Amino acid sequence: MILKNTPVTRDSFNDLILPFYNPSFFIPIKGEGSRIWDQKGKEYIDFAGGIAVTSLGHCHPKLNQVLNYQSKKIWHTSNIFTNEPALRLAKKLVLSSFASYVFFANSGAEANEAAFKLARYYTAKRYHLKKNKIISFYNSFHGRTLFTVSVGGKSKYSDFFGPKPLGIQHATFNKIETVKNIVDKNTCAIVLELIQGEGGIIPALKSFVKDIRLLCDEYNALLIFDEIQTGIGRTGRLFAYEHYGVKPDILTIAKSLGGGFPISAMLTTSEIQSVIIPGIHGTTYGGNPLACAIAEATIDIINTNNVLSGVKKKSERIIFELNTINKRFKLFKEIRGMGLLIGIVLKEKFVDKISDILHASFLEGVILLTAGNNIIRMAPSLIISEADIIEGMNRFYSALEKIL
């Protein structure tokens, strides 16, 4: 039997797809730049960027060109082979970072899973099997596999799935004394986001990051930076660690790396690579030529002075517009973040209105996100135009005017 395409609506979701999500009332069907259109033809300004994913907006012409070209050559090979796009992309990541080696996967969770496994494997080989403790931070987020969700610092994501992996402890973000209280000779790694994303768009303090590096050096532990949300231009540098003057031992990236196409990577050093033997880890789709070709083109566009310096200017314009809005509504307690990862903290008396604010914004044609129950998150395209910023902010103003 040949299945024919039938019309679908948001109402079909509950009948067809496991409800791990609660999608919005409209279905986007087309995107171009920083605008998308739904089934009814309604247009929206996209300040969400697929949760910091569509780093070059929707359907960037260069990415379309590369996708079309590579799709006519070869899509996939098993990992008994390498391929040209993977080698080119790896070289560009190495030349642009602290790292000497790269491992490709498909999602942030997979990159972090590989990083945590590698940290334990390395310290077991270099030191002893008991050196396996991982220190993470409360309210952090590192993925949805059982291992990564346990390393993450939100129990609501890890409870009720049976026994959690052992050897994981959590400290308080930006409070070095809480780390000093638990780090010891059996610590194999300390992992942190340089900006806690799901935890509320909270940047790490420079002094905190430098002290973490010193602790890792003192206890022969590895420093892992989770840059899934901050990597590839999001903060105005190719990697957020460049703002801190501290190099990690392992770094993970995803989201913006593929500009909307699934790909992630783990970067590390020659010293850590030296213990690896074939077969201790792997992935079926990781490093496939189609994803790597698109990611290579994404990096070629983003890793330029024009785009990276433009991130700061666009961020400043958005914050200016938000401050203007706040003079009218006195709604925001704080605006924080870095580059084009922006968190708008609501005053306590408006926290219960956050869902209404998002819904009203959708109705006005502007797409925003949340990060916790009191923070509106913005992660637009790194090349969003000034006109789209102004139009989006005008629509946000209109939404607030209608509900406040």
Image (cartoon, rainbow, N blue to C red):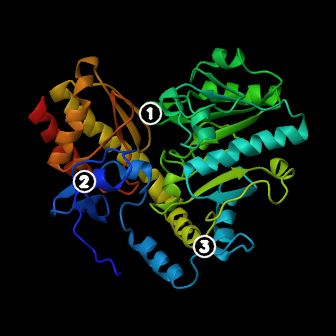
Q: Determine which of the numbered discs, if any, sits on residue 289 in the image.
A: 3
Marks 1 and 3, how far apart in space?
33 Å
Residue furthest out toward the front: 1
Which numbered tag is attached to residue 105? none
The residue lying furthest to the left in this view is 402
Work out whether residue 297 can be spotted: yes
First in sequence: mark 3 vs mark 2: 2
Give percent across and percent down for residue 386.
28, 53
Q: Can residue 387 be seen by looking at this rendering?
A: no
User: Looking at the picture, which amino acid does disc 2 mark?
Assistant: Ile
Disc 2: CA contacts within 10 A as few (<14), some (14-19) or many (>=20): many
Q: Is residue 6 left or right of residue 298?
A: left
- Say which residue label 2 marks: 45
From the viewer's perspective, is residue 296 above or below residue 2? above
Amino acid carrying mark 3 in the image: Pro
Taking the spot 84% from the left edge, 29% from the top edge, the residue there is 130
Which of 288/227 is in front?
288
* Quarter occupied by the C terminus: top left
Could you say whether the residue bearing mark 1 is in a helix, strand or loop? loop
Q: Quadrant of the N terminus?
A: bottom left
Q: Amino acid at mark 1?
A: Ile
Residue on which disc 1 sits:
201
**Nearer to the camera, 316 or 169:** 169
Name the residue located 51 percent from the left edge and 85 percent from the top edge.
72
Q: Residue at x 48, y 75 (%)?
A: 67
Q: Is residue 302 above or below residue 66?
A: above
How many tags in the picture?
3
Residue 279 rendering spot, x and y as whole percentages: 80, 59
